[in-house]
Amino acid sequence: MDDRKKVILQAVVEDYINTAEPVGSRSISKKSDLNLSAATIRNEMGDLEEMGLLIQPHTSAGRVPSTLGYRLYVDNLMQKYEMTANEIEKLQEAVGLKVKELDKIVRGVAGAFSNLSGLPVIGVLPTAETGLVKNIKAVAVDENTVMVIISDRSGIIKNKLLRLKTTVNEEFVSSLNEILNENLTGLTLSEISLKNVMKVQSAVGKNPEILTSVLELVHEAVSEIDTKQIFVEGLSTIFSFPEYNNIDKVKEIFAAVENKENLMQLISEIPANGEMKVMIGDEVPVKELQTNSVILAPYKVSDKLCGVIGVIGPARMDYSKIMSALEYFAKLLSNALGDKFGDGEEPIKKLLEANEKGE
Protein backbone atom coordinates (compact mmCIF):
# COMPACT_ATOMS: atom_id res chain seq x y z
CA MET A 1 0.00 0.00 0.00
CA ASP A 2 1.52 3.34 -1.05
CA ASP A 3 1.90 6.40 1.18
CA ARG A 4 -1.11 8.18 -0.31
CA LYS A 5 -3.44 5.34 0.62
CA LYS A 6 -1.95 5.24 4.12
CA VAL A 7 -2.60 8.95 4.65
CA ILE A 8 -6.17 8.61 3.36
CA LEU A 9 -6.82 5.59 5.58
CA GLN A 10 -5.45 7.46 8.60
CA ALA A 11 -7.69 10.44 7.79
CA VAL A 12 -10.78 8.23 7.44
CA VAL A 13 -10.15 6.42 10.75
CA GLU A 14 -9.54 9.62 12.70
CA ASP A 15 -12.52 11.40 11.13
CA TYR A 16 -14.78 8.46 11.98
CA ILE A 17 -13.42 8.34 15.56
CA ASN A 18 -14.34 12.00 15.99
CA THR A 19 -17.75 12.03 14.28
CA ALA A 20 -19.15 8.47 14.43
CA GLU A 21 -20.46 9.15 10.90
CA PRO A 22 -19.39 7.37 7.67
CA VAL A 23 -16.62 9.40 6.02
CA GLY A 24 -16.95 10.72 2.49
CA SER A 25 -14.24 11.71 0.01
CA ARG A 26 -15.27 15.37 0.08
CA SER A 27 -14.75 15.48 3.84
CA ILE A 28 -11.24 14.03 3.48
CA SER A 29 -10.33 16.41 0.66
CA LYS A 30 -11.15 19.38 2.91
CA LYS A 31 -9.28 18.14 5.97
CA SER A 32 -6.13 16.54 4.52
CA ASP A 33 -3.01 18.18 3.10
CA LEU A 34 -2.98 15.90 0.07
CA ASN A 35 -4.14 18.56 -2.39
CA LEU A 36 -6.14 15.85 -4.17
CA SER A 37 -9.59 16.14 -5.66
CA ALA A 38 -12.57 14.47 -4.04
CA ALA A 39 -12.81 12.22 -7.12
CA THR A 40 -9.21 11.01 -6.71
CA ILE A 41 -9.72 10.39 -3.00
CA ARG A 42 -12.97 8.54 -3.77
CA ASN A 43 -11.06 6.21 -6.11
CA GLU A 44 -8.40 5.59 -3.46
CA MET A 45 -11.09 4.87 -0.86
CA GLY A 46 -12.58 2.37 -3.31
CA ASP A 47 -9.20 0.64 -3.51
CA LEU A 48 -8.96 0.62 0.29
CA GLU A 49 -12.40 -0.99 0.40
CA GLU A 50 -11.29 -3.69 -2.03
CA MET A 51 -8.27 -4.31 0.21
CA GLY A 52 -10.65 -4.93 3.13
CA LEU A 53 -9.53 -1.84 5.07
CA LEU A 54 -12.74 0.18 4.67
CA ILE A 55 -16.41 -0.74 4.59
CA GLN A 56 -19.31 1.09 2.93
CA PRO A 57 -22.36 0.57 5.19
CA HIS A 58 -24.80 1.73 2.48
CA THR A 59 -24.48 2.36 -1.25
CA SER A 60 -24.84 6.11 -0.93
CA ALA A 61 -22.91 6.40 2.36
CA GLY A 62 -19.26 7.14 3.00
CA ARG A 63 -16.81 4.57 4.37
CA VAL A 64 -16.00 3.36 7.86
CA PRO A 65 -12.91 1.41 8.95
CA SER A 66 -13.01 -2.37 9.07
CA THR A 67 -11.33 -4.37 11.84
CA LEU A 68 -8.34 -4.76 9.53
CA GLY A 69 -8.34 -1.00 8.90
CA TYR A 70 -8.31 -0.24 12.62
CA ARG A 71 -5.55 -2.79 13.13
CA LEU A 72 -3.33 -1.22 10.45
CA TYR A 73 -4.02 2.20 11.93
CA VAL A 74 -3.12 1.15 15.50
CA ASP A 75 -0.01 -0.77 14.47
CA ASN A 76 1.46 1.57 11.84
CA LEU A 77 -0.32 4.89 11.29
CA MET A 78 -1.44 6.21 14.66
CA GLN A 79 0.47 9.12 16.14
CA LYS A 80 1.39 8.75 19.81
CA TYR A 81 -0.81 10.95 21.97
CA GLU A 82 1.05 13.36 24.25
CA MET A 83 -0.89 13.78 27.46
CA THR A 84 -1.51 17.30 28.77
CA ALA A 85 -0.25 18.47 32.15
CA ASN A 86 -3.86 18.66 33.36
CA GLU A 87 -4.56 15.07 32.30
CA ILE A 88 -1.38 13.84 34.01
CA GLU A 89 -2.31 15.71 37.18
CA LYS A 90 -5.77 14.10 37.24
CA LEU A 91 -4.27 10.62 36.78
CA GLN A 92 -1.78 11.22 39.56
CA GLU A 93 -4.55 12.40 41.88
CA ALA A 94 -6.60 9.29 41.09
CA VAL A 95 -3.74 6.93 41.90
CA GLY A 96 -2.98 8.83 45.09
CA LEU A 97 -6.22 7.67 46.72
CA LYS A 98 -5.59 6.96 50.41
CA VAL A 99 -7.45 3.72 50.94
CA LYS A 100 -6.22 0.76 52.95
CA GLU A 101 -7.88 -2.24 51.30
CA LEU A 102 -6.19 -3.49 48.17
CA ASP A 103 -9.43 -4.07 46.29
CA LYS A 104 -10.68 -0.56 47.13
CA ILE A 105 -7.43 0.96 45.87
CA VAL A 106 -7.66 -0.78 42.52
CA ARG A 107 -11.44 -0.32 42.16
CA GLY A 108 -11.11 3.35 43.10
CA VAL A 109 -8.38 3.82 40.52
CA ALA A 110 -10.43 1.95 37.89
CA GLY A 111 -13.44 4.14 38.61
CA ALA A 112 -11.31 7.27 38.33
CA PHE A 113 -9.88 6.12 35.01
CA SER A 114 -13.38 5.34 33.73
CA ASN A 115 -14.41 8.92 34.55
CA LEU A 116 -11.35 10.33 32.82
CA SER A 117 -11.49 8.12 29.73
CA GLY A 118 -15.28 8.01 29.38
CA LEU A 119 -15.10 4.22 28.91
CA PRO A 120 -15.94 1.17 31.02
CA VAL A 121 -12.83 -0.13 32.78
CA ILE A 122 -11.94 -3.77 33.34
CA GLY A 123 -9.78 -4.37 36.40
CA VAL A 124 -8.03 -7.38 37.85
CA LEU A 125 -6.80 -7.22 41.43
CA PRO A 126 -3.12 -8.03 41.98
CA THR A 127 -2.52 -11.72 42.42
CA ALA A 128 0.67 -13.50 43.38
CA GLU A 129 -0.15 -17.05 42.47
CA THR A 130 -3.82 -17.48 41.68
CA GLY A 131 -5.38 -20.42 43.44
CA LEU A 132 -2.57 -20.99 45.93
CA VAL A 133 -3.61 -23.79 48.32
CA LYS A 134 -3.09 -22.58 51.87
CA ASN A 135 -4.26 -25.55 53.90
CA ILE A 136 -5.91 -28.95 53.49
CA LYS A 137 -7.68 -30.62 56.37
CA ALA A 138 -9.23 -34.10 56.51
CA VAL A 139 -11.63 -34.81 59.37
CA ALA A 140 -13.19 -38.19 60.20
CA VAL A 141 -16.98 -37.91 60.46
CA ASP A 142 -17.58 -41.61 61.06
CA GLU A 143 -15.75 -44.83 60.23
CA ASN A 144 -16.63 -44.63 56.52
CA THR A 145 -16.86 -40.86 56.00
CA VAL A 146 -14.20 -38.17 55.76
CA MET A 147 -14.71 -34.44 55.24
CA VAL A 148 -11.98 -32.72 53.21
CA ILE A 149 -11.64 -28.96 53.75
CA ILE A 150 -9.45 -26.78 51.52
CA SER A 151 -8.65 -23.12 52.11
CA ASP A 152 -6.78 -20.84 49.75
CA ARG A 153 -4.62 -17.81 50.53
CA SER A 154 -7.54 -15.38 50.05
CA GLY A 155 -9.71 -17.13 52.62
CA ILE A 156 -12.00 -19.10 50.31
CA ILE A 157 -12.93 -22.43 51.84
CA LYS A 158 -14.24 -25.49 50.01
CA ASN A 159 -15.32 -28.75 51.62
CA LYS A 160 -16.75 -32.08 50.59
CA LEU A 161 -17.97 -35.21 52.38
CA LEU A 162 -16.43 -38.42 51.06
CA ARG A 163 -17.96 -41.88 51.51
CA LEU A 164 -15.04 -44.32 51.51
CA LYS A 165 -14.87 -47.98 50.57
CA THR A 166 -12.88 -48.90 53.66
CA THR A 167 -13.12 -47.95 57.31
CA VAL A 168 -10.85 -45.17 58.58
CA ASN A 169 -9.30 -44.44 61.95
CA GLU A 170 -7.56 -41.45 63.52
CA GLU A 171 -4.14 -42.73 62.48
CA PHE A 172 -5.22 -42.87 58.81
CA VAL A 173 -6.72 -39.36 58.95
CA SER A 174 -3.61 -37.94 60.63
CA SER A 175 -1.37 -39.53 57.99
CA LEU A 176 -3.68 -38.29 55.22
CA ASN A 177 -3.50 -34.71 56.53
CA GLU A 178 0.26 -34.85 56.59
CA ILE A 179 0.67 -36.25 53.09
CA LEU A 180 -1.92 -33.89 51.54
CA ASN A 181 -0.33 -30.77 53.01
CA GLU A 182 3.19 -31.96 52.28
CA ASN A 183 2.43 -32.46 48.59
CA LEU A 184 -0.29 -29.94 47.73
CA THR A 185 -0.13 -26.82 49.92
CA GLY A 186 1.70 -23.81 48.52
CA LEU A 187 0.94 -24.93 44.96
CA THR A 188 -1.54 -23.93 42.28
CA LEU A 189 -3.44 -26.60 40.39
CA SER A 190 -1.08 -26.25 37.41
CA GLU A 191 1.96 -26.74 39.65
CA ILE A 192 0.77 -30.03 41.13
CA SER A 193 2.97 -32.59 39.40
CA LEU A 194 2.58 -36.31 38.74
CA LYS A 195 5.08 -36.93 41.52
CA ASN A 196 2.86 -35.11 44.01
CA VAL A 197 -0.21 -36.99 42.81
CA MET A 198 1.51 -40.39 43.05
CA LYS A 199 2.57 -39.74 46.63
CA VAL A 200 -0.98 -38.84 47.62
CA GLN A 201 -2.32 -41.83 45.67
CA SER A 202 0.01 -44.13 47.57
CA ALA A 203 -1.18 -42.70 50.88
CA VAL A 204 -4.90 -43.07 50.18
CA GLY A 205 -4.50 -46.69 49.08
CA LYS A 206 -7.92 -48.18 48.35
CA ASN A 207 -9.63 -44.82 48.53
CA PRO A 208 -8.74 -43.11 45.22
CA GLU A 209 -11.84 -40.92 45.47
CA ILE A 210 -9.98 -38.87 48.10
CA LEU A 211 -7.36 -37.78 45.57
CA THR A 212 -9.97 -37.04 42.89
CA SER A 213 -12.08 -34.99 45.28
CA VAL A 214 -9.11 -33.02 46.62
CA LEU A 215 -8.06 -32.02 43.10
CA GLU A 216 -11.66 -31.08 42.24
CA LEU A 217 -11.85 -28.87 45.33
CA VAL A 218 -8.57 -27.15 44.43
CA HIS A 219 -9.92 -26.49 40.92
CA GLU A 220 -13.19 -25.08 42.33
CA ALA A 221 -11.25 -22.78 44.67
CA VAL A 222 -9.06 -21.54 41.81
CA SER A 223 -12.13 -20.78 39.66
CA GLU A 224 -13.83 -18.90 42.46
CA ILE A 225 -10.71 -16.85 43.19
CA ASP A 226 -10.39 -15.93 39.52
CA THR A 227 -13.93 -14.57 39.34
CA LYS A 228 -13.48 -12.64 42.60
CA GLN A 229 -10.37 -10.92 41.28
CA ILE A 230 -11.96 -9.34 38.20
CA PHE A 231 -14.49 -6.51 37.93
CA VAL A 232 -15.87 -3.78 35.64
CA GLU A 233 -16.30 -0.13 36.62
CA GLY A 234 -18.20 2.61 34.77
CA LEU A 235 -20.24 0.41 32.44
CA SER A 236 -22.91 3.12 32.14
CA THR A 237 -20.42 5.36 30.30
CA ILE A 238 -21.19 3.48 27.07
CA PHE A 239 -24.47 5.40 26.83
CA SER A 240 -22.51 8.46 25.73
CA PHE A 241 -21.56 6.71 22.47
CA PRO A 242 -24.05 6.60 19.56
CA GLU A 243 -22.98 3.01 18.87
CA TYR A 244 -24.95 1.98 21.97
CA ASN A 245 -28.23 3.75 21.21
CA ASN A 246 -29.76 0.38 20.32
CA ILE A 247 -31.25 -1.16 23.46
CA ASP A 248 -30.62 -4.72 22.24
CA LYS A 249 -26.94 -3.94 21.76
CA VAL A 250 -26.76 -2.46 25.25
CA LYS A 251 -28.38 -5.54 26.74
CA GLU A 252 -25.90 -7.73 24.86
CA ILE A 253 -22.81 -5.92 26.12
CA PHE A 254 -24.16 -5.76 29.69
CA ALA A 255 -24.88 -9.50 29.68
CA ALA A 256 -21.46 -10.25 28.18
CA VAL A 257 -19.44 -8.33 30.78
CA GLU A 258 -21.55 -9.61 33.68
CA ASN A 259 -20.34 -13.09 32.76
CA LYS A 260 -17.05 -13.46 34.66
CA GLU A 261 -15.94 -16.28 32.37
CA ASN A 262 -16.05 -13.86 29.44
CA LEU A 263 -13.91 -11.39 31.34
CA MET A 264 -11.41 -14.10 32.26
CA GLN A 265 -11.24 -15.03 28.58
CA LEU A 266 -10.35 -11.43 27.74
CA ILE A 267 -7.70 -11.24 30.44
CA SER A 268 -6.11 -14.49 29.27
CA GLU A 269 -5.18 -12.67 26.04
CA ILE A 270 -2.52 -10.59 27.84
CA PRO A 271 0.83 -11.65 26.31
CA ALA A 272 3.42 -13.37 28.47
CA ASN A 273 5.86 -10.50 27.92
CA GLY A 274 3.52 -8.18 29.83
CA GLU A 275 2.92 -5.75 26.97
CA MET A 276 -0.32 -3.86 26.32
CA LYS A 277 -2.89 -5.86 24.32
CA VAL A 278 -5.21 -4.23 21.78
CA MET A 279 -8.12 -6.35 20.48
CA ILE A 280 -10.28 -4.84 17.74
CA GLY A 281 -13.66 -6.13 16.56
CA ASP A 282 -13.56 -9.80 15.68
CA GLU A 283 -10.12 -10.11 17.30
CA VAL A 284 -11.98 -10.02 20.64
CA PRO A 285 -12.32 -13.67 21.80
CA VAL A 286 -15.85 -13.17 23.21
CA LYS A 287 -18.37 -13.35 20.36
CA GLU A 288 -20.89 -10.99 21.99
CA LEU A 289 -18.22 -8.27 22.22
CA GLN A 290 -16.87 -8.48 18.68
CA THR A 291 -18.38 -5.16 17.58
CA ASN A 292 -16.27 -3.50 20.29
CA SER A 293 -12.60 -3.09 21.09
CA VAL A 294 -10.71 -4.01 24.26
CA ILE A 295 -7.36 -2.59 25.40
CA LEU A 296 -5.60 -4.19 28.38
CA ALA A 297 -2.45 -3.16 30.23
CA PRO A 298 -0.75 -5.07 33.05
CA TYR A 299 0.44 -3.30 36.18
CA LYS A 300 2.99 -4.66 38.59
CA VAL A 301 3.35 -4.30 42.34
CA SER A 302 6.42 -6.53 42.51
CA ASP A 303 8.01 -9.40 40.62
CA LYS A 304 5.38 -11.77 41.98
CA LEU A 305 2.32 -9.57 42.26
CA CYS A 306 0.60 -8.40 39.08
CA GLY A 307 -2.81 -7.14 37.95
CA VAL A 308 -4.52 -5.83 34.83
CA ILE A 309 -6.39 -2.64 33.98
CA GLY A 310 -8.08 -2.00 30.66
CA VAL A 311 -10.99 -0.49 28.78
CA ILE A 312 -13.82 -1.75 26.62
CA GLY A 313 -15.69 0.42 24.15
CA PRO A 314 -16.62 1.01 20.53
CA ALA A 315 -14.19 0.09 17.76
CA ARG A 316 -14.25 3.84 17.03
CA MET A 317 -12.49 4.72 20.31
CA ASP A 318 -9.57 7.18 20.28
CA TYR A 319 -6.81 4.55 20.35
CA SER A 320 -3.88 6.96 20.53
CA LYS A 321 -5.23 8.89 23.51
CA ILE A 322 -6.61 5.86 25.37
CA MET A 323 -3.44 3.77 24.89
CA SER A 324 -1.20 6.61 26.08
CA ALA A 325 -3.37 7.27 29.12
CA LEU A 326 -3.71 3.57 29.95
CA GLU A 327 0.04 3.01 29.70
CA TYR A 328 0.70 5.98 31.96
CA PHE A 329 -2.05 4.96 34.37
CA ALA A 330 -0.72 1.40 34.70
CA LYS A 331 2.74 2.78 35.51
CA LEU A 332 1.29 5.12 38.13
CA LEU A 333 -0.66 2.28 39.70
CA SER A 334 2.43 0.05 39.69
CA ASN A 335 4.50 2.76 41.36
CA ALA A 336 1.82 3.65 43.90
CA LEU A 337 1.29 0.06 45.01
CA GLY A 338 5.00 -0.71 44.75
CA ASP A 339 5.84 2.20 47.07
CA LYS A 340 3.13 1.10 49.50
CA PHE A 341 4.00 -2.58 49.62
CA GLY A 342 7.54 -2.84 48.25
CA ASP A 343 9.24 -5.84 46.68
CA GLY A 344 10.07 -9.28 47.92
CA GLU A 345 8.31 -12.10 49.73
CA GLU A 346 7.60 -10.41 53.06
CA PRO A 347 5.75 -7.32 51.72
CA ILE A 348 3.72 -9.56 49.41
CA LYS A 349 2.82 -11.79 52.32
CA LYS A 350 1.74 -8.77 54.38
CA LEU A 351 -0.26 -7.41 51.46
CA LEU A 352 -2.14 -10.65 50.96
CA GLU A 353 -2.79 -11.03 54.68
CA ALA A 354 -4.05 -7.45 54.90
CA ASN A 355 -6.35 -8.03 51.95
CA GLU A 356 -7.76 -11.17 53.59
CA LYS A 357 -8.48 -9.26 56.81
CA GLY A 358 -9.76 -6.15 55.02
CA GLU A 359 -7.11 -4.00 56.66
Image (tube, rainbow, N blue to C red):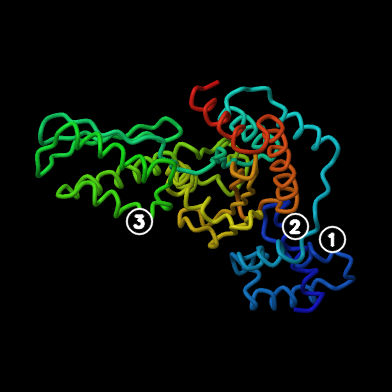
The answer to the question of whether label 2 and label 3 lie on touching residues, with beta carbons closer than 8 A, is no
Secondary structure of the residue carrying numbered label 3: helix
> Looking at this view, is 78 or 54 the one in front?
78
Judge the density around disc 3: few (<14), some (14-19), many (≥20) Cα neighbours within 10 Å. few
User: Which residue is denoted by mark 1 in the rendering?
Assistant: 31
Q: Tell me where residue 147 sits by quadrant.
A: top left
User: Which residue is denoted by mark 3 in the rendering?
Assistant: 195
Judge the density around disc 1: few (<14), some (14-19), many (≥20) Cα neighbours within 10 Å. few
Judge the density around disc 2: few (<14), some (14-19), many (≥20) Cα neighbours within 10 Å. many
In the picture, the quarter occupied by the C terminus is: top right
> Which label number is shown at residue 15?
2
Secondary structure of the residue carrying numbered label 1: helix
- x then y, percent, for residue 306: 60, 43
- x then y, percent, for residue 113: 67, 36
- x then y, percent, for residue 111: 62, 32
The answer to the question of whether label 1 and label 3 lie on touching residues, with beta carbons closer than 8 A, is no
> Which label number is shown at residue 270?
none
2 or 3: mark nearer the eye: 3
First in sequence, mark 2 or 1: give its number: 2
Please state which amino acid type lies under the numbered disc 1.
Answer: Lys
First in sequence, mark 1 or 3: give its number: 1
